[in-house]
Image (tube, grey):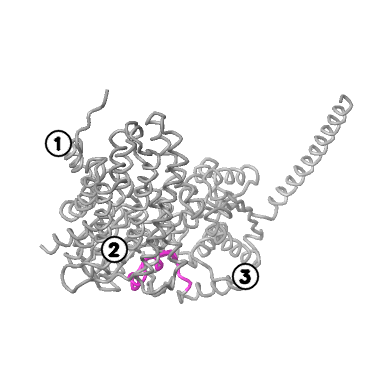
Amino acid sequence: MNNLGNKRRLALLGLVAVFLVFFACTKKQSETSTQATESNEILFGEFGSMTGSESTFGVSTHKGIVMAIDEINAAGGVKGKKIRIISYDDEGKSDGAVTTATKLITQDRVMLLLGEVASSRSIAAGAVAQQYKIPMVSPSSTNPKVTEIGNYIFRVCFIDPFQGAVMARFAMNNLKLATAAILQDIKSDYSIGLADFFEAEYQKLGGKIVAKESYSGGDVDFRSQLTLIKGKKPSLLFVPGYYTEVGLIARQAKDSKLDSTLLGGDGWDSEKLTEIGGQAILGGYFSNHYSHEDQNPVVQNFVKNYKAKFSEVPNGLAAMGYDAAMVAIDAAKRASELSSKGLRDALATTKNFQGVTGIISINEKRDAVKPAVVLKVVGNNEFHYVATVNP
Amino acid sequence: MHAFIQNLINGFSQGSVYALVALGYTMVYGVLQFINFAHSDIFMLGAFAGLYLSVWLAGVQPAGLLLGLVMVGTMIFCLLAGLTVERVAYRPLRSAPRLNVLITAIGVSLFLENLGQVIFGSDPRVFPSLISTQPLFEGEIIVNNVQLIIVCVSALLMFVLHWVVHHTKLGIAMRAVSFDIETANLMGIPADTIIAFTFIIGSSLAGCAAILYGLAYPKVEPLMGVMIGLKAFVAAVFGGIGNIVGAALGGVILGLSEAFVVYYVSSTFRDAIAFAILILILLFKPTGIMGSVRREKV
């Protein structure tokens, strides 16, 4: 017994020794790589949901980012330096976002962070970035709170309520519909924000709001609200909710013979929309960040290159990831010095940058001012590009 | 006037579904004096059973036969589920304090909801339209065939239930067990069997309600039972818990009050106002509209 114990102890000692040597080696390696970085590389960090239930979000964004960086490096990089991206998976969790952002900043010593799609995770990781004064660019977090964290947090997408104004302009200028009813989800800040901005802009343009009614997310019966709205005879019905309720509302509106045109925001963007809404949702319009059908040559060029690289059509998140990386690179080009502080100051003065998702300017709240596209529901999970609405 | 009648129709069809689910709560309470919180999840399981059955039986003609088959199949599935819950979770606790059974019921409910999320995923699914929605007649007021089916099937089931409880041996036994479980046992009534039957009837009604609900609102998800369960429970209390006619009445009144509050008062405060009305009525009639005062035995 004793003999065996001694053997075990020896083996353990040996193991520890091996580990020590291993760590010493890796430490040395990482030191050399940092030294290399300082001379000829600019380090960007990315964290996203590469696995988990929202893995498609993270993976698409990652592809867009990688494509942008590859293009710039192929063209010679920035100020004679190549850009290197370090990507980590936050597994779609807020604490994962915090851990990976901290690791990128303190261990990998990146100059700038790119991430996340979900507003909740951008908010969690944004606090870390702000604390260490590392600029962070979110590709597609639309919640207004994200950039309120501090002066190092930026985004290249518009904020939620802006879509309300977009749809109001589209209704008045393109569809020429001058009476509207609103049906909002009283439980969701997103929906209320869109509804309020729609109402303000629509009335400013001379439109008339004849009814503003509410439902609670999760409801299935909207007939009473629709009966009320039908009595006011609006020419359009603005429903800034999520696809499940919107689908049911469309169905019941059709059953109630309410034939107003349906309008909404990017909460509609799901394959489930037409599955639940069926025939009733066809002919509705909603706003979104990007459409691959946009005939703008910048978009078409992006779609062509993306298809060649990944053999699939880029979705909105890939386009936003691409633009986030490109805006960051543009800032690096214009920066007076290649440091986090220099990049932050350059990001804050981004003006009229031509991105795939439109011409982007960063305002004093560090939010992007840019156009939105309007899509029309034409068939089973088919949305066609109709118009671009400028801010 | 048109709007008034339209709201009456909408509220009535919505209320009928509440009533069917409320019957399950009230029957179990009547017999065992505890709230079977898992009832709303049996309803959810019924909706999923109906979904899979309709996909499996797709192609059966005519549509009426398909609907009938799906409904019967779902009711059988639900009664088995209800029976299992009773046998596994409630029967072993028959002699335990009522609070323990109540907590077990909450546990079973959470278990079924989470199990649903694991098996079916939390993304909502679309219930197939077994019959296409069509208005019954032209005109200002719209009544569609689905609403008519909901009201007719619900009314039919409630009459059958009323007849079973008041005019059959099983019903007499149920009422005896409800009155005093120990004495009923002494008189030779197999109380456990009667209780199992109560669960069978309540659960199959929930299954039927799930199909009717799926026809009108084709969205099926693991947490769909929570809100409707809450409303049906309120309807049962409002009607006088333990009373079958009361539960039916409570469901219909809740559906109507929701519809009218939205139309005439405010859609923003729908639930708050609808429930406030119920609380007001309960203040004046604490046992519910059909409830009778039951003295605690010493």
Same subunit, labels 1 and 2: the answer reads: no
Residue B240 point in image, percent of width and height: 22, 40
Cα separation between marks 1 and 2: 42 Å
Count of all numbered marks drawn on residues in the image: 3
How would you rate the neighbour count of disc 2 (Cα within 10 Å): few for under 14, some for 14-19, many for 20 or more? Answer: many
Q: Quadrant of the C terminus of chain A?
A: bottom left
What residue did someone put label 2 on?
A238
Task: Identify the image quadrant of residue A167.
Answer: bottom left
Secondary structure of the residue carrying numbered label 3: helix
Label 1 marks a residue whose chain is B
Secondary structure of the residue carrying numbered label 2: strand
Left or right of residue A267: residue A231: left
Task: Tell me, yes or no, if residue A164 can be seen here.
Answer: no
Label 2 marks a residue whose chain is A
Q: Quadrant of the N terminus of chain A?
A: top right
Q: Does the magenta run of residues contain A275?
A: yes
Name the kind of residue labelled 2 in the image: Phe
User: Can you say whether B194 is above or below A385 in the image?
Assistant: above
Name the kind of residue labelled 1 in the image: Phe
In the picture as drawn, the residue positioned furthest to the left comes out as: B1
Q: Residue at x 22, y 59 (%)?
A: B10
Q: Residue at x 62, y 42 (%)?
A: A106
> Residue B284 has which mark?
1
Cα separation between marks 2 and 3: 39 Å
Cα separation between marks 1 and 3: 72 Å
Is label 1 or label 3 in front?
Answer: 1
| Pick the front one: B119 or A321 | B119
Residue A105 point in image, percent of width and height: 60, 45
Is label 2 or label 3 in front?
Answer: 2
